[in-house]
Image (spheres, grey):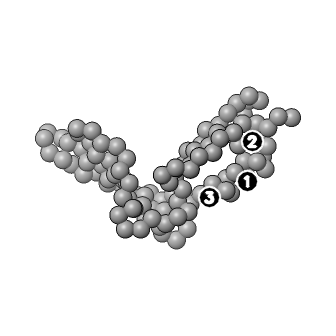
Amino acid sequence: MAPTGKLVLSFRDYTKELTGNQRFIPIKSDDSRIRTCFLEHVENTVEVTDLLYEKTNGEWVLKASSYHKVITDSKEIVKHLKSIGLQIMFKEEQNGMVTMMVMKSSL
């Protein structure tokens, strides 16, 4: 990282297991696409299922895919960033999302 460089991180907080309808997260929609994610805790990971509806020739077509994500704890990430000499300039947690900006600490 350059001496004056900054790093912006943004990730979903999976440390709190969502239940019931909370597990469905609307991502984006317009006239021809609707994208939703479904989250399910599986052991030490979260299985993310993406559901994409696309309008093709006047009909809605579903495309689905799944993958696993590691559960990341923002406190552990902050601890690690500080241990490698980075300074937390900004950190916000809102609606299950964590956003932070870090930069190199002054020497």
Q: Is residue 73 left or right of residue 105?
A: left
Q: Residues within 10 Å of mark 2 (few under 14, many from 20)?
A: some
Tell me the kind of residue under disc 1. Answer: Lys
Contact? badges 2 and 1 (CB < 8 Å): no
Along the line of sight, the residue nearer the viewer: 15 or 57? 15
Check whether the beta carbons of the residues at disc 2 and disc 3 lie within 8 A of each other. no
Inspect the image, locate mark 2, and give the three-letter code of the amino acid beneath it: Gln
Q: Is residue 88 above or below residue 21?
A: above
Can see residue 106? yes
Please tell me which residue is depicted at 69% across the width and 39% down the height of the picture: 89
Residue 45 visible: no
Residue 14: x %, y % from top left:
52, 60
Q: Which residue is mark 3?
A: 73
CA neighbours of label 1 inside 10 A, class few (<14), some (14 to 19), many (20+): few
- The residue beneath circle 1 is 79
- The mark that comes first in sequence, 2 or 1, is 1
- Compared to residue 13, the image places residue 60 above or below, namely above
Q: Which residue is found at the position 61% from the left and 38% from the top?
A: 8
Considering the numbered disc 1 on the image, is that residue within a helix, a strand or a loop? Answer: helix
In the rendered image, which residue does mark 2 sit on? 87
Q: Are marks 1 and 3 in contact (CB under 8 Å)?
A: no
